[in-house]
Image: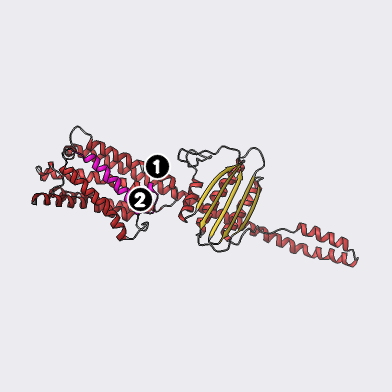
């Protein structure tokens, strides 16, 4: 009885050492994105941890080696728990979790190999106290340095909110390495213990681990560069808006100068009509003068950024022969940052405008309507088009300008989701219709 209790205690200690450091790493990456408080999150994570303990007990006391199934089972349990705890797309969570599981797999193998050098007899059995000691050493050597990488690379990449569609596929990279690990350890000629205590096998796995690290690094660089490009496009939008505003201001100044110069001539003409009591002629002169008076700067709504944006696209539509109708009733202040509004509306209207420009037949139309109702912001952007709209198998729109996915719509989706909104895209009778609703 005493021996069984001691064995269970060793398994509990091993499980805690095998799980707690990785829990802390994952929670650190997604700090600030938890759905629950620290106590509730810890309680939820206790469930898969207890499951791992129970499964480890079956590995020790079962007649048949079932470590392969056990490893997959508790891995899936941890991923499910984190998807419940963390308020992020499942692709992001799976990517980080699978990376940490791969590191965990190597630490398990490396600690077992180290145990075989110092405790060769005990190393041929699982979860002994000697294994826990060597695991602490390995984690100090590998997990702590990896924590620095998490801080410098993973945290910034996970904070990026755009390009959600990338994470639908990027998690497959660590998933492939996970199954390579799993196959090499559990489906070799020998048992998993024999593989873990073979120095050559461990060195081979170390090389694979280094290669996977390099690929993870490249993936994170691509994510950050993609987000930086999106920010650059947003800044370019704002620069274009400022340029348009400056040009409109210059036009108004020139028009005012011309009006002041011509004013005395108009006064002379009107005075002449009055002296002759030629009231029909004066009325006609007024009508002609009114028709020639410039309308001034385009004004669509009170919101400064959105008004500039709509004026900018109105000007582009005019230059490209597109019939553009804009109706907007947006207040001067919205609880959404101007840069998010510029990227959201700018991407959607730019896509609609480009579809109209590429149209080869029929009348080109662009219809934009925006308003606030209560605490909701609503926008509809409809445009004519005559090119086929392409999607991939998962329903993500493909770009008409380059190979791959269309970044504009996915970037807009990310912003809408960030504000608990909805984005709907439809095609009706030659019109591409986008409608969005954002909770203010």
Label 1 Cα neighbours within 10 Å, binned few <14 / some 14-19 / many ≥20: few
Q: Nearer the viewer, mark 2 or mark 1?
A: 2
Above or below — where is 384 with respect to 145? above
Q: Is residue 259 magenta?
A: no
Magenta-drawn stretch, dominant element (helix, strand or loop): helix
Residue at the image position 71 percent from the left and 62 percent from the top: 257
Q: Which of disc 1 and disc 2 is earlier in sequence?
A: 2
Rendering coords of residue 325 (x, y %): 65, 51
Residue at the image position 77 percent from the left and 62 percent from the top: 262
Which one is in front, 316 or 70? Answer: 70
Label 2 Cα neighbours within 10 Å, binned few <14 / some 14-19 / many ≥20: some
Q: Which mark is residue 169?
A: 1
Rendering coords of residue 19 (x, y %): 24, 51
Rendering coords of residue 138 (x, y %): 20, 49
Residue at the image position 62 percent from the left and 55 percent from the top: 311
Q: Secondary structure at mark 2?
A: helix
Q: Which residues are magenta?
A: 65-92
Q: Secondary structure at mark 1?
A: helix
Q: Is residue 89 magenta?
A: yes
Q: Are marks 2 and 1 in contact (CB under 8 Å)?
A: no
Q: Which mark is residue 83?
A: 2
Instruction: Tell me how far mark 2 sits from mark 1, CA to CA.
Output: 17 Å
Q: Which mark is residue 291?
A: none
Above or below — where is 252 with respect to 362? below
Rendering coords of residue 397 (x, y %): 50, 42
Instruction: Say which quarter of the image contains residue 174.
Output: top left
Which one is in front, 335 or 217? Answer: 335
């Amino acid at each position: 009885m005493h021996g069984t209790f001691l064995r269970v205690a060793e398994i509990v200690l091993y499980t805690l050492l095998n799980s707690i450091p990785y829990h802390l790493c994952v929670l650190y990456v997604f700090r600030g994105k938890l759905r629950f408080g620290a106590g509730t999150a810890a309680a939820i994570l206790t469930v898969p941890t207890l499951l791992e303990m129970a499964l480890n007990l079956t590995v020790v006391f079962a007649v048949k080696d079932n470590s392969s199934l056990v490893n997959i089972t508790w891995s899936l349990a941890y991923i499910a728990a984190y998807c419940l705890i963390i308020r992020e797309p499942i692709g992001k969570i799976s990517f980080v979790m699978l990376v940490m599981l791969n590191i965990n797999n190597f630490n398990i193998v490396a600690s077992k190999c180290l145990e075989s050098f110092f405790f060769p007899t005990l190393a041929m059995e699982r979860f002994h106290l000697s294994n826990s000691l060597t695991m602490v050493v390995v984690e100090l050597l590998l997990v702590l340095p990896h924590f620095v990488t998490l801080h410098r690379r993973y945290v910034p990449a996970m904070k990026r909110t755009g390009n959600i569609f990338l994470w639908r596929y990027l998690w497959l990279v660590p998933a492939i390495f996970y199954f390579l690990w799993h196959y090499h350890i559990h489906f070799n000629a020998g048992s998993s213990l024999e593989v873990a205590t073979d120095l050559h096998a461990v060195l081979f796995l170390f090389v694979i681990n280094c290669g996977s690290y390099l690929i993870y690094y490249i993936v994170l660089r691509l994510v950050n560069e993609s987000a930086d490009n999106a920010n650059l496009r947003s800044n370019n939008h704002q620069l274009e808006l400022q340029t348009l505003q400056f040009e409109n201001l210059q036009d108004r100044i020139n028009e005012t100068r011309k009006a002041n110069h011509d004013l005395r001539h108009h006064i002379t003409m009107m005075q002449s009509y009055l002296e002759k009591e030629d009231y029909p002629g004066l009325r006609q002169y007024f009508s002609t003068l009114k028709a020639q008076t410039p309308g001034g700067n385009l004004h669509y709504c009170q919101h400064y950024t959105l008004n500039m944006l709509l004026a900018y696209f109105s000007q582009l539509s005019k230059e490209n022969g597109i019939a553009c109708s804009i109706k907007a009733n947006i207040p001067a202040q919205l609880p959404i940052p101007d840069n998010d509004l510029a990227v959201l509306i700018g991407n959607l209207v730019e896509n609609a405008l480009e579809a109209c420009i590429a149209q080869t037949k029929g009348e080109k139309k662009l219809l934009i309507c925006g308003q606030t109702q209560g605490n909701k912001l609503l926008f509809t952007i409809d445009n004519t088009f005559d090119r086929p709209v392409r999607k991939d198998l998962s329903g993500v729109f493909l770009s008409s300008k380059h190979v791959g996915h269309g970044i504009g719509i996915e970037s807009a989706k990310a912003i809408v989701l960030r504000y608990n909104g909805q984005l709907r895209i439809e095609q009706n009778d030659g019109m591409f219709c986008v409608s969005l609703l954002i909770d203010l």
